[in-house]
Structure formats: C-alpha cells, structure tokens
Amino acid sequence: SMADELLRVSGLDAGYGKVQALWGAGLTVRPRETVVLLGPNGAGKTTLIKTIMGLLPSWGGTIGFEDHDVSRERTDKRVRRGIAYMSETACFPDLSVDDNLHIGGQFLPPAELKQHIAGLYRRFPILEEKRRALGSSLSGGQRKILGVAKALAGQPKLLVMDEPSAGLSPVFVKEVIQVLRQFRDLGLALLIAEQNVKFLDLADRVYTLEGGRIGFEGTVEEMHADAALERAYFGLK
Ligand code: ATP
C-alpha cells in the first residue's frame, strides 16, 4: 500500500521535444530503503531522476510521495515534502561551502538550519575547515561529500542522486559509498542512479534501465542469478 512506500513512480513517460526518452517507467522506494537504478550511458537515468524532481515535465504517468500525487508540483514543493536531489555536479562550484549548505536547507526555519549545519560540520570536519572556500576549490571527492551534506541540510526523507560516481576515481567512489552507508544506516532512504556496479553494495533492491524502459527489478542476489544480467552488468568487471 501507499503507506509502505515513500516514493511510487508509475507509467512515467518523458522526453525532449518530440523525442521520447522514458517509456512507462515505474519504481518504488520504501522508507529506509536503498534502491539503485542501474543502466548504461544514455539509458535514461538522468531523464528519470529529473522527471521525479520536476526538473523535466512528465508526459504521462504519476509520481507519488507519501500520500501525495506530486506529478504536477513544482520542484521546490517536492523538495519541501522531503525529496532531496543531488545532480551529477553535486554542489554549486561558484558558491562557498557554507552557502551551499544554506541553500540545501533553505526551507527550514533559520535557527533549525543553523543547528543542523553545525551538526553537519561536526560530522564532516573537512567541510568546516573549508567553509569559506568555493565549491570549485574542493577535490572531486570533497565536492560529492559537500553535495551529500547540502542535500541533507534540508533534512529530507529521501535522497535522490544522479550518478554520484561521475568524475570520481575509484578511491573517492569508495569514500562516497562509505558516507552514503552511514546515512542509510541512520534510516535515510536513497535512490541512486548509477552505471557503477560498486553502488550495488548499498542496494536493498535494484532496477535496470535500458533504452528508456525498466527491465529487471529485484535484489542483487537475484541479479547475479540471472545469466544475461550477470553477463551484461558484471561480465567485464
Ligand atoms: P548518462 O549516463 O550519459 O547521463 P543517462 O542514462 O542519464 O545517461 P539520459 O541523459 O537520461 O541518459 O538520456 C536518455 C536519452 O535522452 C538519450 O538518448 C539522450 O541522448 C537523450 N537526451 C538527453 N538529454 C537530451 C536533450 N537535452 N535533448 C535531446 N535528447 C536528450
């Protein structure tokens, strides 16, 4: 039922101009659950994530969050409801670390935000050290940590991420996964669009997206048990 689900996407169509890029996509994320949306370049991951956030209009289908149909709501309304978004670039490079965090939590009462940002600085000392530095001056890995912290500044119920591994070397990918694991373990729900199978270490469930359509849905174990999926996604690891 709806009560068991935080996010429920069904029959979602979207695209660019006359070109359809997403065909009847459906997925759910339950409270505290980590869902990985796996697919190759051009599969439609960014399109699906942006449509969920309202950054692209849906052509058809529905997007439900908790008990609300948010399909026609503006992005900021969706964010206020508790859906945080991290883009491939993660943070605003032209703004300071501190300003990034304030933007992430701009919908909270100022006193609450201040306290919450202080908590994020305690958790991520590197961000406190660099609070006055521009996002662009951070390393690739630090930018992603800032992106996660920025998203968390608004105290979301669900964090939706578009390719957190983008532009990162393997050692930083590991670091980002460790940070996400901490918040998952604290009860935050995650929806992660990725082509890097390393993120499956975090996944309670997986969807594959190919040619704008959801293919497989199941656990990582079930994915490994499927010879075609095993070949397609793990064959050349
Ligand atoms: P990537 O890993 O490269 O980000 P993706 O899975 O996120 O890939 P999308 O960016 O959602 O894929 O692209 C899905 C399809 O939509 C592709 O065929 C792409 O060429 C097309 N597309 C994406 N953005 C646009 C755009 N602005 N205008 C026209 N077509 C687009």
Image (tube, rainbow, N blue to C red):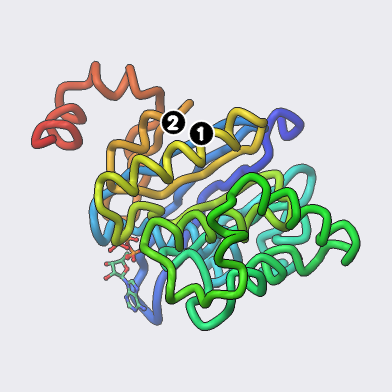
Q: Distance between the residues labelled 2 and 1?
A: 7 Å
Q: Tell me the SS state at disc 2.
A: helix
Residue 173 horizontal/vertical position (percent): 33, 46
Compare residues 24 and 208 and report the one nearer the observer. Answer: 208
Residue in the image at 44% along x and 31% along y: 202
Image quadrant containing the N terminus: top right
Given residues 230 and 32, the one toward you in this image is 32
Residue drawn 51% across and 68% down? 91
| Residue positioned 59% across, 69% down in the render | 97
The answer to whether 130 is drawn above or below residue 25 in the figure is: below
User: Mark 1 — residue?
Assistant: 181
Name which quarter of the figure residue 142 lies in: bottom left
The quadrant of the picture occupied by the C terminus is: top left
Q: Is 220 drawn above or below residue 123 in the view shown?
A: above
Mark closer to the observer (2, 1): 1
Q: Are marks 2 and 1 in contact (CB under 8 Å)?
A: yes
- The front one of 6 and 204 is 204
Answer with left or right where residue 190 lies relative to residue 166.
right
Give coordinates of residue 22: x percent, y percent.
39, 59
10 Å crowding of disc 2: few (<14), some (14-19), many (20+): some
User: Disc 2 designates what residue?
Assistant: 202
- Please state which amino acid type lies under the numbered disc 1: Arg
Location of residue 193 with respect to 230 vertically, above or below: below
10 Å crowding of disc 1: few (<14), some (14-19), many (20+): some
Q: In this view, does 215 lie to the left or right of 61?
A: left
